[in-house]
Amino acid sequence: MIYETLFIRHSDISDDLLSKIYDLKAVRWNYDVDQQKEWIQKNVFADDYHLMIMEDQQIVAYTNLINIKVIINGDDVNVKGVGNVCTLKSGFGLGNILMEQVNKIILKYDSKGMLLCNDYLVGYYQKFSWKLIDKSCVKSNFIFDVNFMLFNFDKSILSLDYNDRNF
């Protein structure tokens, strides 16, 4: 299978591609197309990015990379918030391709990555060198009961405060 990777700034994405993103997210998340559109309009800003894996003009895997700030060990740190990770079909390795591309982009731009996930996904993301942050170190005013994971951040995490936007 030959896949194409598209990495597009939100301000540059076409309405057609956005529509395809809404459709894919509606397949994988329990929200309809209109709710997906509303979420992206509210939470994805002009300088954020969409990452898509394409097969024959169809999006088969998607995530967004959102420019956010987090306070780690008392210091403001700019990171790429990786959210809405989804694939059209399970069991075909599309998530692996997507996460490999996410890591390459974060490293290419000498950035840091942060994602949120449920317990059952921690091991999956650890396969791609994402590090789980101890929940006792995490403080957030609006995100609860999920795991915070970081990529390309080598310091020990004593505290992580996150109160930026949803991603």
Image (cartoon, grey):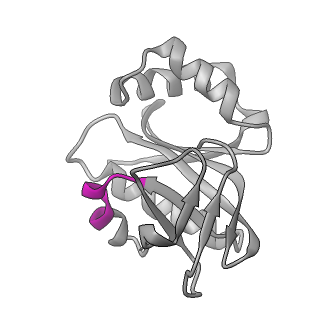
Provide residue 48's location: percent of width, then percent of height: 72, 45
Q: Is residue 143 left or right of residue 10?
A: left
For the residue pair 144 and 2, the one nearer the viewer reads as 144
Q: Is residue 43 left or right of residue 94?
A: right
Picture quadrant where residue 25 is located: top left
Q: Is residue 98 visible?
A: no
In magenta segment, residue 120: yes
On the rendered image, what quadrant is the C terminus found in? top right
Q: Is residue 35 visible?
A: yes
Picture quadrant where residue 121 is located: bottom left
Provide residue 144's location: percent of width, then percent of height: 46, 49
Q: Residue furthest left?
A: 91
Count all numbered tags in the image, as a single digit: 0
In magenta segment, residue 96: no
The residue range painted magenta reads: 117-124
Q: Residue at x 32, y 72 (%)?
A: 127
